[in-house]
Image: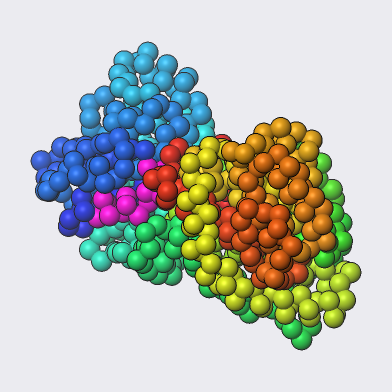
Amino acid sequence: MCGIVGSIGKEDTVSILIKGLKRLEYRGYDSAGIAVIDQKGLILVEKRAGKVKDLENEIGEWKPDTNIGIAHTRWATHGEPNELNAHPLMDCKNRIALVHNGIIENYGSLKKILADRGHFFRTETDTEVLAHLIEEFYEGNLFEAVRQSLQEVEGTYGIAVISSLEPDKIIIARHGSPLAIGHSGGGMLVASDTAAIVDHTNKVVYLEDREIAQVSKDNYKIETIEKVIVTPKLQIIETDIKKIEKGGYSHFMLKEINEQTQIIKDSIRGRLDRESGTARLDGLDRHKKQLIETDNLIILGCGTSYYAGLIGGYVIERNAGIQVNVEYASEFRYKNPVVRKNSIAFAISQSGETADTLAAMREASRKGAVCLGICNVVGSTIARESEGGVYIHAGPEIGVASTKAFSAQVMVLNLISLLLGRMRIMSYDEGKIYVDRISEIPQKIKSVLDEADCIKEIAKLYSDRNNFLYLGRGFNFPVALEGALKLKEISYVHAEGYPAAEMKHGPIALIDKEMPVVVIAIKDSVYSKVLGNIEEVKARKGKVIAIATEKDSEIQKKADHVIYVPETIDSLYPLLTVLPMQLLAYYIAVERGCSIDQPRNLAKSVTVE
Ligand code: F6R
């Protein structure tokens, strides 16, 4: 959510910043801006509402004589996404420029104090108070002025600050919003996400919460806001540039959907133990005793990750016989939740930075739960703060709508259920069969993805509809929720996911000949019930798009369209049934001409509440 990049000591500062912003654009894209200090010591700022491309077009061949600059791509929280409110934001005398991710919660009271002291505000943002606060504290030392300002601030921040008064440094600080320093030959880079700087370096130092750094062209120092000197930990990151480029696909989303065969192979590689009919998850080893003893798991997540968690709840209860509470992280943190003495909480998050999930995890930990993470981004805050956990190995997910991360989360939750199951109620033979069925999944994913053209044709027929209903039961009920969410997010079509049997308790009133109903009707234990639900839709002239198990000829007679998936065991079906959902949403959005990788109002990684 919002992206920051900065460069010092390197030539071609403007193009480094613009390229960095493009790599960050998936995190926020309603406006963008850049500030550099030229050789005369002046801060030059360019900002635009809209995409980074608009900013790039605007600045054209602009090549100021500079080797220091900061830049930002925004997802608006306070104040409209217009040019004025775009970052960088400045102090009264235009001598300090600042970019900020996060929210300054006490900006109202600070603004009033600063206005009373004569500061003049130009924007509706919360961020601007910080530029004025730094100006207020400035007495010849930018690092100290930023530090003092941050002591006054409540809320979350990742910031980068430059000043024409000290044009040889960038000051950065973090609390709740990630930031890293990158060592690059002949200069230094700073970024809120290493994607912005991987073209230049793979050596980074991550800041921790409440740390502040002064970065100059050939070195840096880090301290805590409370003045404790920090010894930096240099890390080598392994981002493959190919993984963050479209690689010939028209959209990242389509690329990521198609990567799922490989991603699922990656998420199970080395983790299946056929000999013992179980899963091997090193990140949980230290907690074996607690995992054996617990009688309550809590799964916390938001959005798509929450839906993957719901599937995890079904799967773990079925395979391991442990009671699981799956909770929206945003609700859990404020409801004064009951956490039992031996509860274990899994925080599930692709980015590992989602503010609500992090806060819920901290709340669970405060109340005594062992907190484990299921994350994609290595070294992310949730991954670092949890006591252990499992990486999903989905690789960078750039499309704002999550696809491959969902599948990898569901697979990891299946592996956890297998491990817990074998510690408790699952027999050796059952475990071995589970291992075999899991190993077959990548090939089965491929065979569903090979049917993309048939889904594209169905999408064309229904792309003009304004409402969709998605129905599923059991393990596939959360898949119905996820299918509806995907459609809403990227094509702005209203869609609702429902447990199929609940339809008759209300939503059935919506059904008429205009209403497409996507029904997951695979051959599992509730198949005949779902067929009954399809009859109910057809009796009201609704159009049924069924996701069914291959060779099911019965369903052809009932549904208007059938998309087949290969046979597997009940708890693994979501890994197959979600694929037509993702493709249907994608092709409908294509037909409607939507901005697929950057849907309106959304951003990847929601680091504000
Ligand atoms: C939907 C989507 C969001 C995220 C949610 C949680 O396509 O991407 O609903 O799933 O914001 O994000 P993470 O998993 O990063 O915590």
Image spot of residue 230 (x, y percent): 46, 55
Identify which residue is drawn at 80% across, 67% down.
420
Identify which residue is drawn at 65% across, 49% down.
544
Magenta stretch: includes residue 26? yes
Residue closest to the eye, 117 or 321: 321
Magenta stretch: includes residue 103? no
Q: Quadrant of residue 485?
A: top right
Q: Is residue 207 visible?
A: no
Residue closest to the eye, 170 or 35: 35
Image spot of residue 76 (x, y percent): 42, 34
Q: Which residues are magenta?
A: 16-29
What colour scheme was applied to this rendering of the protein? Answer: rainbow
Identify which residue is drawn at 50% across, 52% down.
459
Q: Quadrant of residue 328?
A: top right
Residue 567 versus residue 143 in the image, above or below: below
Q: Quadrant of the N terminus?
A: top left
Residue closest to the eye, 63 or 176: 63
Residue 519 versus residue 246 in the image, above or below: above
Mark count: 0
Identify which residue is drawn at 30% across, 35% down.
49
Q: Quadrant of residue 423?
A: bottom right
Query: Is residue 296 shown left or right of residue 609?
Result: right
Query: Is residue 293 shown left or right of residue 101?
Result: right
Query: Is residue 44 shown left or right of residue 228?
Result: left
Instruction: Kindly report the secondary structure that dominates the magenta region of the rendered protein.
Output: helix
Q: Quadrant of the C terminus?
A: top right
Image spot of residue 284 (x, y percent): 71, 67
